[in-house]
Amino acid sequence: MVLVAANLRPVITSVPPVVDGLVATFGLSAFAAGALTTVPVLCMGLFAPLGAIVSRRVGESATLALAVGLIAAGALLRSVAGVAGLYAGTAVAGAGIAVAGALLPSVVRARVPARVGPVTGIYTAALIAGAFLAAGATEPLRDALGVSTQAVLAVWAVPAIVAVVVWLAARSPSPPRGGTRVPLPWRSGAAWLGAVFMGTQSLLFYGSLAWLAAVYTRLGMDTAHAGLLLALFSATQMVTAFALPALAHRFGRRPLWTFGSVGVTTVGLFLVALAPDPFPAAPWLWAALLGLGMGGNLSLALSIVTDLAPTPREASAYTGMAFLVGYTLAALGPVALGRLTDLTGGYRAGFLVLGAVGVVTAVVGTAAARSTAARMH
């Protein structure tokens, strides 16, 4: 599960470090370059419901292996065949990420039902670590291997292939579920709480990821230090992604942990908006604060959505709906914030809006966590 999770973000985060080279090679516009990040996130939403459909026919183990295989194939395809391969491979990998990401919570619920929170924290930390590794290693690998900016993207097929092999070797095949198809729970109020929580916390993350460095480069920070700022933002996420679900599992009171995690995020967003650099260490403290909140938000959202499902069989439908709503919203968020930046001429308004979304996220996330407590008792 850890190896599978570690492959759910490198295809996305390996692009920004080499995007300037891709723009120079293919003459891409800013919109076209941005689509290399937006397309897989959008696919993560649009293709997530396929996980429940395919696993019903061939079983969860086979479907998960197929999904990670798509990630590997997409990573290879985008490294060849020019600009067409670049975008086609990105879409293929995005579809694989969608299916694998939607199925992992269901697999956890079915196979370790007594430890959903801690196991979710472990694989979420692995997911964030994979994203961090790809962001930091892609350009050094390109330089060390002496390959083009497009060719180096194939490197991230290797860990996906390893994950497929290990998954097939270590997991006994799960039988197809058969029976009546489990539809997406559109009429469930609890499912909607989970989906909106997944969507708004994702919007906070991708909005911050897109614009945090830009805030500080406009204030005079050089690009190297802005990159380190994003690295700190990513690294601190691993701490709470691992710890908060385990703490909630051990001590209970998941609504309180959820409110606190989103509250930390929201405070960080308002600080970036209203007091971005009142003293020299402030950018680093605010980035760390945002990262600590974001890591907890994601892992808690995943465990909450998983536990909202009445049965393990329905868990993949609940996560499919949450990802469909959540990542579609997340894909649109940075674009809308970019438009707001164009209109206002600065980043303050965008981060104020994100802070307001953080308040809504705290309310919705707490309500979703309460729904899981009511179901489990």
Image (cartoon, rainbow, N blue to C red):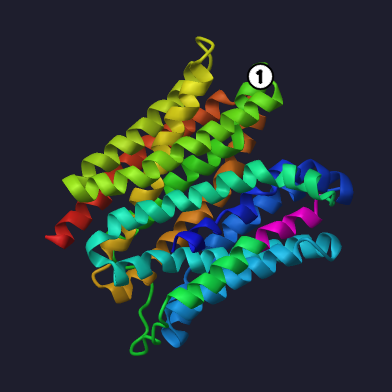
Location of residue 259 by image quarter: top left
Which is more toward the observer, 363 or 3? 3
Residue type beneath disc 1: Met
18 to the left or right of 336: right
Specify whether residue 151 is painted magenta.
yes
Of the pair 349 and 50, the residue shown nearer to us: 50
Majority secondary structure of magenta residues: helix
Disc 1: CA contacts within 10 A as few (<14), some (14-19) or many (>=20): some
Residue drawn at x 45%, y 35% is 236
Q: Quadrant for the N terminus, please.
A: bottom left
Q: Residue at x 61, y 25 (%)?
A: 215
Residue 209 in picture, x, y percent from top left:
56, 38
Residue furthest to the left: 377
* Magenta residues (range): 149-157
Residue 320 can be seen, yes or no:
no
Q: Nearer the viewer, residue 291 or 348?
A: 291
- Judge left or right: residue 111 versus residue 331: left
Which residue bears the numbered disc 1? 221
* Residue 224 location, quadrant: top right
- In this view of the protein, which residue sits in the foreground, 278 or 29? 278
Is 185 situated left or right of 249 in this image?
A: right
Dot 1 lies on which element? loop
Q: Position of residue 199 (x, y in %)?
A: 44, 51
Percent of width and height locating residue 92: 66, 68
Above or below: residue 114 compared with residue 60: above
Is 130 covered by the magenta stretch?
A: no
Number of numbered discs visible in the structure rendering? 1
Residue at the farthest bottom position: 179
